[in-house]
Amino acid sequence: MLFFYNKQMLGETLLITIEQAEQVTYENKKSMTLIKNLDGKLVGLNLFNIENLKLEGNGNIELSEDAKEILNARLEKNGIKIDLEGNNDDYFVVGEVLTKEKHPDADKLSVTQVKISEEETLQIVCGAANVEAGQKVAVAKVGAMMPSGLLIKESKLRGVESKGMLCSRKELGLDYDPEVKGILVLDPSTEIGRKIKELNL
């Protein structure tokens, strides 16, 4: 479950993503919009007028226990029961670029194989000029919500499947030098699969 809050852009509104769905319907209730898949399952919520939650931060946020308690009471009053536990940090991990090949149909894209655990390697299409085999990099897995609000999904880029994203400091919401282009390249000794948040970048 992902929580997105940006007061400057959206005002006192909290966007909750429970799970991904290709096609959705919207049901407006008082001070909230229910987002459901075509089977009628709740997959997201937009909650308005949330001043009493006293949220802090910008982009992906974690709810305090007090905020969860207030939010649960509001949801239950409207007949909605969901588990508010969720951690977007699990979707951002250290990966190792095993291979890099030129995209067959796009000069500025590369097709990479990126190992994120002993059991899992992802094919990720990347447009950064500085990506190379052997690098340790920051990976946003499918299901990650970026600080911009972008939800990472499986996709095809010029006909090639991509299951994730290699991230720059800017895309991760970190301090960055605008003169430095491309993805964030981590120290070679960084452990594969470790959460990016644990690195104190």
Image: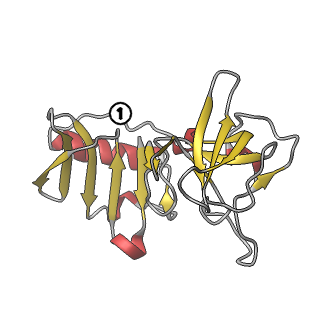
Instruction: Examine the rendered structure and indicate whether residue 55 appears above or below residue 120.
Output: below
| Identity of the residue drawn at 66% across and 61% down | 128
Give the left or right position of residue 55, taking residue 111 as reference: left
Closest to the observer, 157 or 102: 102
Residue type at numbered disc 1: Asp
Instruction: Please state the horizontal and vertical placement of residue 153, each as a whole percent of the image.
Output: 43, 45
| Residue topped by disc 1 | 83
The image shows residue 22 at horizontal and vertical percentages of 27, 43
Outermost residue toward the right?
189
Image-based side of 169 in relation to 16, left or right = right
Estimate how packed mark 1 is, as few (under 14), some (14 to 19) or many (20 or more) residues with alpha carbons within 10 Å: few
Name the residue at 40% across, 71% down: 7
Q: Quadrant of the N terminus?
A: top left
- Identify the colour scheme used: secondary structure
Q: Secondary structure at mark 1?
A: loop
Residue at image point 87% right, 44% down: 188
Q: Position of residue 15 (x, y in %)?
A: 34, 55
In this view of the protein, which residue sits in the foreground, 34 or 97?
A: 97
